Image (cartoon, rainbow, N blue to C red):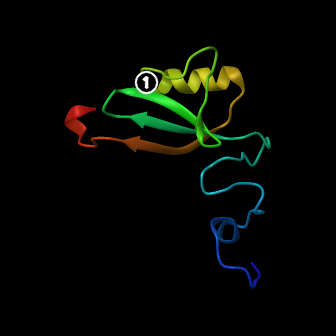
């Protein structure tokens, strides 16, 4: 790793090029397609995909009842997903 004059960022620390991936998970390193971020809406018990700051519609759906069905739909549509999941709402395990 070389020292640069630019402030440190995730891309600098990980050794990837700045255009390959950003902190929001909007770019896939392998395909160059916008990467989807999985979001669990804990209060309403639904799962959604966020890409480039907006909810993503897949095959006419905006939400799924569980993470597995969301991941299957994204795979069928060719949408790469980030492995980082955002959990909103209540996080205690009794209510999941």
**Nearer the observer, 50 or 94:** 50
Where is residue 35 shown, x and y percent of the image? 67, 41
Q: Residue placed at 76% from the left, 39% from the top?
A: 33
| Left or right of 81, for residue 86 | left
Give the percent coordinates (x, y) of residue 44. Answer: 33, 27
Going by the image, does 54 lie left or right of 1? left
Q: Is residue 61 above or below residue 95?
A: above
Q: Residue at x 45, y 44 (%)?
A: 86
Taking the spot 67% from the left edge, 79% from the top edge, the residue there is: 7
Is residue 37 shown left or right of residue 5?
A: left
The residue sitting at 65% across, 42% down in the picture is 52
Q: Which residue ends up furthest to the top in the rendered image?
A: 60
The answer to which of 18 and 60 lies nearer the viewer is: 60
Q: Position of residue 13 (x, y in %)?
A: 65, 71
User: What is the total number of numbered labels drawn onto the structure image?
Assistant: 1
Circle 1: element type: loop
* Residue designated by label 1: 66
Identify the residue at the far front of this view. Answer: 54
Q: Work out which quarter of the rendered image holds the N terminus and state it.
A: bottom right
Q: Residues within 10 Å of mark 1 (few under 14, many from 20)?
A: few
The image quadrant of residue 79 is top right
Q: Quadrant of residue 42?
A: top left
**Which quadrant holds the C terminus?**
top left
């Amino acid at each position: 790793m070389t020292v640069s004059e630019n402030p440190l960022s995730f891309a600098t620390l990980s050794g990837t090029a700045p255009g390959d991936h950003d902190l929001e998970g909007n770019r896939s390193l392998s395909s160059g397609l916008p990467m989807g971020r999985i979001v669990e809406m804990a209060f309403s018990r639904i799962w959604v995909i966020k890409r480039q700051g907006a909810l993503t519609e897949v095959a006419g759906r905006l939400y799924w009842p569980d993470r597995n069905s969301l991941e299957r739909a994204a795979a069928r549509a060719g949408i790469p997903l980030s492995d980082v999941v955002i959990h909103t709402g209540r996080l205690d395990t009794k209510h999941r």
